[in-house]
Amino acid sequence: MLFSLSFSVSAIPETEATAASDTTPGAISENALRDFEESIFLHPQQTYRKLVTLAQANDFSNEGRVWLLLRKAQSENVLTLYKEMDATLVTVAPLANVMTNEQHALWLYLQGSRMHQTGNISGAIDTLKYAVEVAKENTNSTIYVLAIRELGYGFALSGDYYRATLILQDAYKNLVTLNNPFFNGLLEESLGDTYNYLGNYTKAIEYYEGALTFFESIGYQPHVASTLLGLAMVNRKLESWDDALSYFNRYEIALSFTDNHSENFYLHYGRAMTMAEKGECNLAIGAIDDALSLSGPIDYNAELYKKRALCNLTLDNLSAAKQDLSKARTIFNGIEALHNTQWHLELDYIAGLVAFKDNRFEQAFEYIHMYYKDFLELQRLNNSEYVTQVQATMEAERKDKEIALLKQQTQLQAVTAREQSLKVRQKNMMLSGVALIFALLLIFVIFQNKNAKKLLALSIRDELTGLHNRRYFFDYFENNLVKLNPNHVGLALISFDIDNFKHINDNLGHHVGDEVIKTVAQTAANTLRTNDVIARIGGDEFIIALPRTTLLQAKEIAKRILENIRSHRFITKEGADFSVTASLGVAYHDQNKFIALDVKSLMESADTALYQSKRAGKNRFTVAA
Ligand SMILES: Nc1nc2c(ncn2[C@@H]2O[C@H](COP(=O)(O)OP(=O)(O)OP(=O)(O)O)[C@@H](O)[C@H]2O)c(=O)[nH]1
């Protein structure tokens, strides 16, 4: 539930109720505008109408006008009137230089949360960090809490769950002493969202329920609604279909706080998907059609078509299933960013089931096989050791099943006529398909939490080199190397940096510099083994983790990297012909020494060794003491 509903509150002023209901522009004092916050949450629709009326009057000072516009944008955010909100933010921008600190922080926060909604996650993170900085003067202010929360979302959306959880838990620890139900509700809701994304659904429910109690106690309907949606979604993931459906019903009632029906799509979408997953296909098809008629985001529509295809298969409506599948395919063809994601690959899986129903067994097997292959490749690209372990288990399980099936086939073939054996072959083909699906479903369950779709896919890669980025590397390190595998045999880190790179930029241009970075990245990556992880840390600096390695192997790899980099010749369009070198630092953690793995100090050792290589004349590697 990481869509953003933004709110803020202050102590209820005596004048607040009047402020919200009075529509005469002249009757409102400028100070009262600042205090409009709470009425935005209690009566969003009425407050918004009031603010629109006031905005038509021109008799405000600059400070008053800024408050008016910011509060208007804030209520537009609450009511998800994003077009209007964008326009209001444009109107307030020229007044940036007369804003007070408090206004400036609110302005930054609103921009940051809007960036989230449009998918500009890195922009949102930068803007929100700035908002937190500006709001920090008063850490018990509403804007500070809101900005921290939104920043936590930013980290979660970019796949940095670790930092998201840390920042929110930290804020929670400080704010819980204030005993403000709104703040407590906000933070519990955010922790619910983060655990939801982390796949810890039981913990997510715990936090969402806490948040719901706080929000209901103060009557902030937009928050009650968003928390109920969170509870519905988590229960769906836990396959508690009836609880999920009952939360969707409560969400529908809570949505009455707004006249804007755009959130209805998520209600109908969630409900339809839940019904289909529950197996109530007759009901689900009607619900899917309702959701499709609401013109939600196009990739959600594709998911609806996929589910309808599966339901139609269950109901033996083969031709309808084919049509659904083709509609889903058309949508995916048009969204390049989603190509080769799990959601895209699932089309082949469904196509396999359709072909099977159609008695095209060979084709069914082909599709499912292709799906299986592509899916594992996708996971390999994600390059997590955890994934590899799961895959290995699944693969072993699949092989066992296939062997058992082959045995069965041989026995059957020995006693049956040729005609019968053809049938058996078809049956076995189906059974191995089922075995594959079984294996894949298990993997799916594990990766279901990674549903930030393209946002996640984009956020773990460095744009220039296509390698993993810094964030992914640290996340991988903490979550896969340290937590999941504390007893690894040995772990080496290699930190490296291209020598005299600035010289290349200065003499041959930035575009050549970029090419050098890309080629060096590729050369180093090609030198590594499948389970090694390389990431670009920034500029011309890279880091490599070599799990399950001896120091001797690590040195060998460092040597090969150096050789492969220095032996590459660059020839530019302009006729320059040159090669580059790099300096490396190797740090090694030896489990046999019974010293706990400390990421930070291992990285520092690798960096120190790298600088020793630089000082000793570059183009070499040094092993940290
Ligand atoms: N072309 C290009 N240059 C970059 C990029 N990111 C950072 N840089 C430049 O990379 C250079 C990094 O230089 P340094 O590593 O500090 O120094 P160096 O010249 O390599 O010297 P030594 O490391 O001591 O060998 C700086 O000039 C940055 O401006 C990028 O994405 N593309």
Image: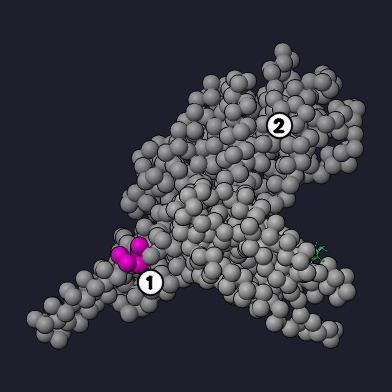
Q: Which residue is mark 2?
A: 144
Above or below 109: residue 452: below
What secondary structure is marked by label 2? helix
Quadrant of ligand 1 in image: bottom right
Mark 1 surroundings: few (<14), some (14-19) or many (≥20) residues within 10 A = many
Secondary structure, magenta segment, majority class: helix
Q: Amino acid at mark 2?
A: Tyr
What secondary structure is marked by label 1? helix
Residue ID at (76%, 76%): 580
Left or right placement of residue 252 versus residue 407 in this view: right
In 3D space, how far apart are the residues under numbered discs 1 and 2 (Cα atoms)?
Answer: 50 Å
Q: Which residues are magenta?
A: 393-397
Whether residue 396 appears in magenta in the rendering, the answer is yes
Q: For the C terminus, which image quadrant?
A: bottom right
- Report whether residue 163 is seen: yes
Left or right placement of residue 607 versus residue 190 in this view: right
Marking on residue 368: 1
Residue 475: image location, x then y, percent: 57, 52
Residue placed farthest to the left in the image?
Answer: 415
Kindly indicate the quadrant of the structure image that contains residue 349: bottom left
Q: Nearer the viewer's eye, disc 1 or disc 2?
A: 2
Above or below 512: residue 48: above
Residue 519: image location, x then y, percent: 69, 75
Q: How is the image coloured?
A: one colour
> Which of 112 and 155 lies nearest the eye of the viewer?
155
> Which of 64 and 176 lies nearest the eye of the viewer?
176
Above or below 196: residue 621: below
Mark 2 surroundings: few (<14), some (14-19) or many (≥20) residues within 10 A = many
Residue 237: image location, x then y, percent: 42, 46
Residue ID at (66%, 53%): 604
Above or below 485: residue 508: below
